[in-house]
Image (tube, rainbow, N blue to C red):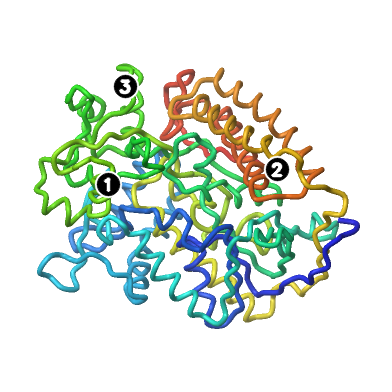
């Protein structure tokens, strides 16, 4: 950054939020009464993963349920790796998060004939009905409500189609003292200009990295941008080997990444082989209500054993009225594709769904770098351990958005935040336009395919070695490309995906056991003590 062809002055805010899912929007709303907030999102504000969440939000709401039961269910699903304090923190703060959403106007489903009484459903791994939902489109309803509130706020500036390039830290600038995040560079897709954003506090809420795999339930935006940027900034990451594969993604050539919610199994859906045989009872006594990792491995086993392209999820024994009431969106989408779930089973396959690991944070969402926070799927708070319990993710977004913003607000109010410093503009004076973007698309396809083949639901040492070898070659190619050509969103996403893939493989290679979502044929047993996998830049 010695010279520059861009002279745009830095854009100053109190807080920068990267990402427009539930975590980012919640943080923005909580800060917007007093502080100037910028939300940067690389596509339209509605296109994050939160809006795709179907099942709901886990919270103790029923008088017969308890915090202790919710904590226990989370710990069991997490296979010994959940942090107890973080788990208790989220569970105990979950009800007030639901109440906050109610106050904002989210139209949660209610019990028929009982106005004001929320309908609670049950999902795999839960010992009670505690899933608050909006039929089968909870994420979309929550997002819609929050987006309207954010757009109405005079203190929130929304930068759509802006892609994070990198964080700006004092260490990168060569300044003495503790490493602190003081801003970021972002590519404006409309003008192809890299803008400089400056703020004393930055929140990463960019979601997970499902697009590192060939098959995923995630939107195209889930490219691990926040995790990769935080790693490059000097943050530790943890438990990246634990990638949750959702057991039931719709298997259809015209349906891209369409999830069949956990709640279908929670309401009596049965998994069948193409022969019509039910198979889950022989894999786990909890059958279809076993945690996602168990169900995904069982489906993977049966598909490979029988040479099947998919298995089937059958809830046709329930009345049509029941299906339309509980799963109206899934019913309508399947019907569009010629599948009547009230009369026939739904073809499904496992697909990469959730990144349980991420940037290490404390209970205030702080990372190792001062002034930098991570919230939602980008973070590793300790809640999910080796496997996320269904519907614990949306509430985690809100609980940690609240704790992070409370700390940020107190620092801004006290004047203890860092004083502004002069930040250099982005230097692209020595690069040119790429002559062949086919290199990017080819590397993207190759990465996603070998990650699916070698670092999927079942792993071996040999597969991980092959993946590591290919990642090293790709990293060299991408570093050369990045150094010589103007950045584009495709290049930035590929750079981040390869970085995240490297973190996943290194974490998987470091774990010499099978635990939760990480299953190794070379180490099929589980060690007595559960230890997180922590990587340091």
Q: Which residue is mark 3?
A: 308
**Residue 533 at x, y percent in the picture:** 56, 38
The quadrant where residue 370 appears: bottom right
Residue situated in front as seen by the camera: 423 or 510: 423
In 3D space, how far apart are the residues under numbered discs 2 and 1 (Cα atoms)? 48 Å
Q: Please tell me whether residue 359 is drawn above or below residue 23 in the rendered image.
A: above
Q: Please tell me whether residue 17 is drawn above or below residue 517 in the rendered image.
A: below
The residue at 10%/41% (across/down) is: 317
The quadrant where residue 427 appears: bottom right
**Residue 68 at x, y percent in the picture:** 30, 54
Quarter the C terminus occupies:
top right
Q: Earlier in the sequence, mark 2 or mark 3?
A: 3
Q: Earlier in the sequence, mark 2 or mark 1?
A: 1
**Residue 308 at x, y percent in the picture:** 31, 22
In 3D space, how far apart are the residues under numbered discs 2 and 3 (Cα atoms)? 42 Å
In 3D space, how far apart are the residues under numbered discs 1 and 3 (Cα atoms)? 24 Å
Residue situated in front as seen by the camera: 232 or 362: 232
Residue situated in front as seen by the camera: 192 or 421: 192
Circle 1 crowding by C-alpha within 10 Å: few under 14, some 14–19, many from 20: few
Circle 2 crowding by C-alpha within 10 Å: few under 14, some 14–19, many from 20: few
Name the disc covering residue 336, or none.
1
Do the residues under discs 2 and 1 have CB atoms within 8 angstroms? no
**Residue 57 at x, y percent in the picture:** 33, 58
Quarter the N terminus occupies:
bottom right
Helix, strand or loop at label 3? It is loop
Circle 3 crowding by C-alpha within 10 Å: few under 14, some 14–19, many from 20: few
The residue at 58%/50% (across/down) is: 360
Name the disc covering residue 537, or none.
2
């Amino acid at each position: 950054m010695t010279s520059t062809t861009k002279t745009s002055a830095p854009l100053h805010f109190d807080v920068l939020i990267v990402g427009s899912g539930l975590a980012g929007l919640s943080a923005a709303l909580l800060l917007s009464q007093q502080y100037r907030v910028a939300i940067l999102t690389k596509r339209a504000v509605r296109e994050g993963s939160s809006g795709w969440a179907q099942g709901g939000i886990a919270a103790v709401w029923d008088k017969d349920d308890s915090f202790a039961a919710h904590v226990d269910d989370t710990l069991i699903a997490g296979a010994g790796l959940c942090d107890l304090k973080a788990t208790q923190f989220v569970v105990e703060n979950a009800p007030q998060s639901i109440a906050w959403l109610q106050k904002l106007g989210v139209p949660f489903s209610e019990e028929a004939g009982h106005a004001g009484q929320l309908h609670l459903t049950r999902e795999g791994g839960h010992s009670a009905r505690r899933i608050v939902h909006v039929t089968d489109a909870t994420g979309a309803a929550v997002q819609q409500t929050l987006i309207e509130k954010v757009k109405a706020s005079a203190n929130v500036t929304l930068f759509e189609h802006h892609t994070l390039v990198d964080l700006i830290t004092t260490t990168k600038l060569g300044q003495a003292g503790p490493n602190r995040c003081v801003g970021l560079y972002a590519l404006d897709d409309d003008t192809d200009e890299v803008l400089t954003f400056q703020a004393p506090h930055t929140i990463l809420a960019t979601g997970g990295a499902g697009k590192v795999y060939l098959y995923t339930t995630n939107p195209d935006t889930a490219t691990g941008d926040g995790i990769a940027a935080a790693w490059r900034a000097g943050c530790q990451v943890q438990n990246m080997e634990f990638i949750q594969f959702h057991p039931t993604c719709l298997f259809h050539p015209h349906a891209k990444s369409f999830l069949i919610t956990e709640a279908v199994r929670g309401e009596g859906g049965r998994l069948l082989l193409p022969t019509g045989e039910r198979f889950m009872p022989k894999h786990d006594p909890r059958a279809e209500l076993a945690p996602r990792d168990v169900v995904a491995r069982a489906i993977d086993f049966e598909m490979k054993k029988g040479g099947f392209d998919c298995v089937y999820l059958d809830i046709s024994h329930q009345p049509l009225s029941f299906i339309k009431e509980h799963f109206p969106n899934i019913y309508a989408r399947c019907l569009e594709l010629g599948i009547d779930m009230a009369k026939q089973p739904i073809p499904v396959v496992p697909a990469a769904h959730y990144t349980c690991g991420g940037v290490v944070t404390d209970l205030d969402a702080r990372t190792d770098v001062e002034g930098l926070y991570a919230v939602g799927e980008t973070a590793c708070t300790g809640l999910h351990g080796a496997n996320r319990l269904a519907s614990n993710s949306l509430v985690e977004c809100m609980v940690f958005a609240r704790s992070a913003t409370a700390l940020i607000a107190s620092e801004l109010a006290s004047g203890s935040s860092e004083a502004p410093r002069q930040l250099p503009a982005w230097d692209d004076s020595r690069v040119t336009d790429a002559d062949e973007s086919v290199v990017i698309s080819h590397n993207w396809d190759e990465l996603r395919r070998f990650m699916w083949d070698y670092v999927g639901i079942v792993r071996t040492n040999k597969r991980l070695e092959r993946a590591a070898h290919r990642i090293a070659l790709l990293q060299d190619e991408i570093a050369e490309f990045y150094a010589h050509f103007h950045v584009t969103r495709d290049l930035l996403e590929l750079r981040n995906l390869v970085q995240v893939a490297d973190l996943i493989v290194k974490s998987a290679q470091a774990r010499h056991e099978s635990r939760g979502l990480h299953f190794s044929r070379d180490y099929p047993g589980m060690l007595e003590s559960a230890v997180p996998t922590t990587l340091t830049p």
